[in-house]
Amino acid sequence: MHDLFSNGICKYGLVEILNFYIYEKQYFTIQDFNDQRKKISKNCLDSELQRMPDISSHFSSKDKRKTVLLKLTSSEMRFLIHYFPLIAGRFIPRGDKVWTYCVALVKLVEMCLKRSFTETEIDKLQEAITMRHELYKKLFNKDLKPKQHFVVHYPSVIRTSGPVEQMMCFRNEANHKNFKQYAHIMSSRKSISYTLYVKASMKFAYDLLNENFLKVELNNNFEFTDNRLRYYFKDIAQLTILNNGFDVMMSKKINYKGTVYKSGSFIALGGKNGLSLYQVVEIVHQNCGYFLITQYWKEGHFDEHYMGFKAIESIPTYKIIDIEEIKNPPIMLHRIEELFYFRLKPSFND
């Protein structure tokens, strides 16, 4: 978390990239970037990108010039680097050398966040770290910072201790706010650490007793619906899940074990034949299970410039997917230069 996102290599890299494009090449302005970020955030499912503040600038007495100022939390920086190719890519000509560094930075972050590694993938991670550091020194004429050096040790740490993604302190530090609030309202200061420990333990025991973890929240009540009235019925009637009676329980949105699925969002499934993209039409609850009625989208090739896949068009082909089979979070399409693009989460290929 601290090496990559919290004043780490992502911030070092993005500041240099933005300074180069805004103040040297003048491909776009700070306002252009903020407007494009807001446009992308309105059509994404990650609230961190929506709530992050606009980037600004200040005068650096050390460099004797204006420089971009990024004041973001670790979580906000994590999602900014994920969507950065879609936000800034439209302003940058293809083949730009600094954009090559940007792509290398995004790839490195995604490789570090993988949940499993083979020996070959660890070697590729080592190569990606070396290439990113060399490009950083060459393009920006800057020395490496300590946090950039820490990343050099990631391959050896992964070999001995496992993926670093499993050791991040995101969720632990997210609880700091609660402890600070508890400490502020407590009148006793005799043993505040013990008091906080007891309160946290009791809350955890309460959640376990009431099975509050990974609950299924029905944001909209499921209603019985005659599926024969649906426009897609003739195309999926041969599937058995809807043949157990014409009246089935349907909804437009569900929070299933912490992940929100809703009509209009997209699911990317990988297999032996490659990537498949589906748009969620409705959610079905039947036989103690939850299923997504989806429509197939024709996907295009991977665009290295935007670090995403093209989505060509929707196809009148429908598929019912068991929600338990989905291993990756929903995504959305983003319209750039009259085309649709989507980016996969780092853990998609795990």
Image: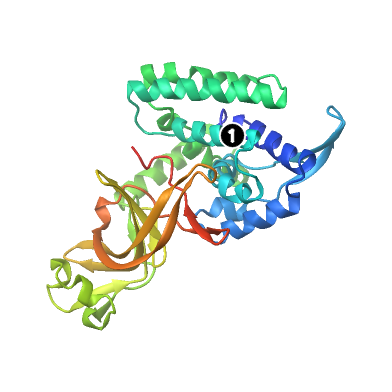
Residue 44 x %, y %: 51, 57
- How many tags in the picture? 1
Color encoding of the figure? rainbow
Q: Determine if residue 176 is in view.
A: yes
Residue 204 x %, y %: 38, 44
Residue found at x 60% / y 47%: 89
Residue found at x 28% / y 73%: 250
Relative horizontal placement of residue 281, taking residue 337 as reference (left or right): left
Q: Quadrant of the C terminus?
A: top left
Residue found at x 13% / y 77%: 245
Does 230 sit above or below residue 16? below
| Residue type at the position of mark 1 | Thr
Q: Which one is nearer the viewer's eye here, 183 or 242?
A: 242
Q: Which one is nearer the viewer's eye here, 194 or 235?
A: 235
Residue 253 x %, y %: 38, 67
Relative horizontal placement of residue 173, taking residue 225 as reference (left or right): right
Relative horizontal placement of residue 143, taking residue 110 as reference (left or right): right
User: In terms of secondary structure, where does tag 1 sit?
Assistant: helix
Q: Which residue is mark 1?
A: 100
Residue 236 x %, y %: 20, 70
Does 307 sit above or below residue 60? below
Q: Determine if residue 186 is in view.
A: no
